[in-house]
Image (cartoon, helix red, strand yellow):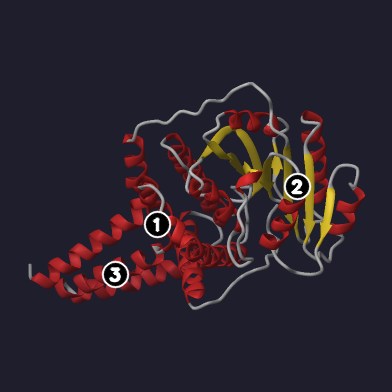
Amino acid sequence: MTAIDLALGILVLLSAVLLLWPFLFYPLILRLLPERPVTRGAGATPTASLLFCSYNEAGALPAKIANLRALKAQHRGLEILAFDDGSADGTGALLAEAGDLLTLVSGPGRSGKAHGMKLLAARATGDVLIFTDANVLLDEDAIVALLPYYADPDVGGVLGSLRYGGADSSASASIGALYWRIEEHLKDLESRTGNVMGADGSIFSIRRALYPTFPDSVLDDLTVSMSVVFAGKRLIKAKDVIAREMMVARREDEYRRKVRIAARSWHTHAHLRPQLHRMSALDRFKYASRKIVRWFGGLWIALGAVSALVLAWRIAPVAAIALGAMGLGLLGLGLAARRGPLAGIVDMLLAYVATLKGVLLAMKGQTFTTWAPAKSRD
């Protein structure tokens, strides 16, 4: 074996390790770290405000409003605030009709979720701010289960646990559900060992005093939740605080969503970089393992595939050509399919491509301030 062949083999191995790092090696390392328990006390319960933004969510709002009434019945002191981002489907009217339940803040037009959440947070009066999405339903005891975690003075933020429905509706939904099951497991392990590295918008909370200032171009869920870590408090995950959401069924919807989220994540990373450098060594390791390595997964796949093909060509050119042709053929079949293992593998590859595309667009300065709900969510 020549030095070039050895280098190509190392690149293939390194690419595989980097691709698997967030899902295999990283959680194994987390399991070896000591546990940091949380004191969940009785005492005085803090007041709470529940915040969510909506845009063209008329189809989801009847169930959402019924869910909010159930939450309010369990925790009567709960303050609920909603932001309508210039909806054109009657979302604002449906929220206004629930004026006995919630306070509606209407935007002048499309201004984006980050802007809307900042407006709601400025009006909220609760000691704890609870963030969720318009298409997410919370278990009736979610608020009651969440607030006792704040009896521990070291806790500055609490994430809930997300359960997805509709995973069998398509290959895209199935892969998405698998991804989120892994994501939830990683958050559990991170919480057990100290801090979770950021929240998504389905269900998380922070102490109101820790709410930061930030530009509208960033991912507000990540920015707001990481402010807890930067303040020296713990950001933990609660397994008994449950949120439920339907998976995106169409491949095209999921691809656009991942591009947008990845671009906003990279802008958020750039915004948070000075504070990230001041985190503990363990938290920096967690952040790099769960965020940065994963954002470039598409690059690791491309690097590994090209290195493997070049190595195969150097060993047996005919075999390399056959391998490349077979790969392209399987890719074409997977793109045409909507169900089955091959479609699932292609959806996984597209997720990596979409994430890398979003990061590269953000690096070139493109921003995604507004959003639209996926039409294929059942």
Residue 323's tag is 3
In x, y percent, where is residue 55? 76, 61
In x, y percent, where is residue 308? 25, 68
Q: Which of the two discs, 1 and 3, labels the residue nearer the N terminus? A: 1
Q: Nearer the viewer, mark 1 or mark 3?
A: 1
Q: Nearer the viewer, mark 2 or mark 3?
A: 2
In x, y percent, where is residue 22? 38, 51
Real-space CA distance between mark 2 and mark 3, rounded to the nearest whole angstrom: 59 Å
Q: Which of the two discs, 2 and 3, labels the residue nearer the N terminus? A: 2
**Residue 165 seen:** no
Residue lying at 68% horizontally and 59% vertically, measured from the top left: 376
Toward the viewer: 249 or 153? 153
Residue 163 position by quadrant: top right
Instruction: Tell me the amino acid under the disc marked 1.
Output: His
In x, y percent, where is residue 63? 80, 44
Tell me whether circle 1 and circle 2 mark residues in contact (CB < 8 Å): no
Instruction: Tell me the amino acid under the disc marked 2.
Output: Ala
Please give left or right for residue 109 compared with residue 241 in the image. Answer: right
Toward the viewer: 16 or 312? 16
Residue 124's tag is 2
Residue lying at 56% horizontally and 76% vertically, measured from the top left: 366
Please give left or right for residue 105 compared with residue 272 in the image. Answer: right
How packed is label 1: few (under 14 Cα within 10 Å), some, or many (20 or more)?
few
Residue 349's tag is none
Quick one: which residue is furthest to the top in this view? Answer: 42
- Identify the residue position indicated by label 1 in the image: 277
- Badge 3 marks a residue whose secondary structure is helix
Instruction: Tell me the amino acid under the disc marked 3.
Output: Leu
Residue 311 position by quadrant: bottom left
- Badge 2 marks a residue whose secondary structure is loop
